[in-house]
Amino acid sequence: MATSVRQNCLHCEGPDAPSERFEWEVFVNTKSGDRLEASGASPFQATAMDALRTAMRDLPSGAWGQISHRVYDVGAVADDHSSRIIFRTFLDAAGSVRFERVAA
């Protein structure tokens, strides 16, 4: 079965409205490549941005992050086809987290 196939939802009420989630990841550059340092998810974009910003604050220069937006139907499993990166982040020279919107 494909991962986007609808699953039984015994607790759903009303019409099936699509759901969305904002997933964030923070990476640190190492000699052996990028290492995942922290990650999380939120149903709200602003909350995901705040969490990513907090996670990056005490990291060394060269740390970077991204926020992905996922949309999926209630009762369906999210798959990679419903995900797109909407922001990339980096630390500037002053140590502030900068967000760059990724073109659609």
Image (cartoon, rainbow, N blue to C red):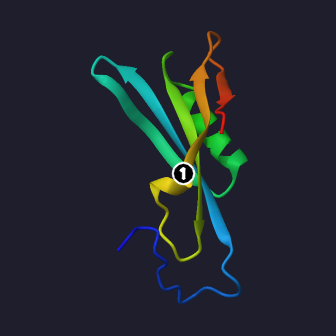
* Amino acid type of the residue that numbered disc 1 sits on in the rendered structure: Ser
Quarter where residue 19 is shown: bottom right
Quarter where residue 13 is shown: bottom right
Q: Which quadrant of the figure contains the C terminus?
A: top right
Residue at 57 percent of width and 87 percent of height: 11
Quarter where residue 14 is shown: bottom right
- Percent from the top left, x then y, of residue 60? 48, 18
- Percent from the top left, x then y, of residue 9? 53, 85
Q: Crowding at label 1, few (<14), some or many (≥20) Cα neighbours within 10 Å?
A: some
- Percent from the top left, x then y, of residue 12? 61, 85
Residue at 37 percent of width and 27 percent of height: 34
Q: Which quadrant of the figure contains the N terminus?
A: bottom left
Most foreground residue, 14 or 54? 14
Residue at 66 percent of width and 24 percent of height: 98
Q: Is residue 84 left or right of residue 15?
A: left
- Percent from the top left, x then y, of residue 89? 60, 28
| Secondary structure of residue under mark 1 | strand
Most foreground residue, 48 or 16? 16
Most foreground residue, 80 or 57? 80
Q: Is residue 84 above or below residue 14?
A: above
**Residue denoted by label 1:** 83
List the single residue furthest toward the left. 32
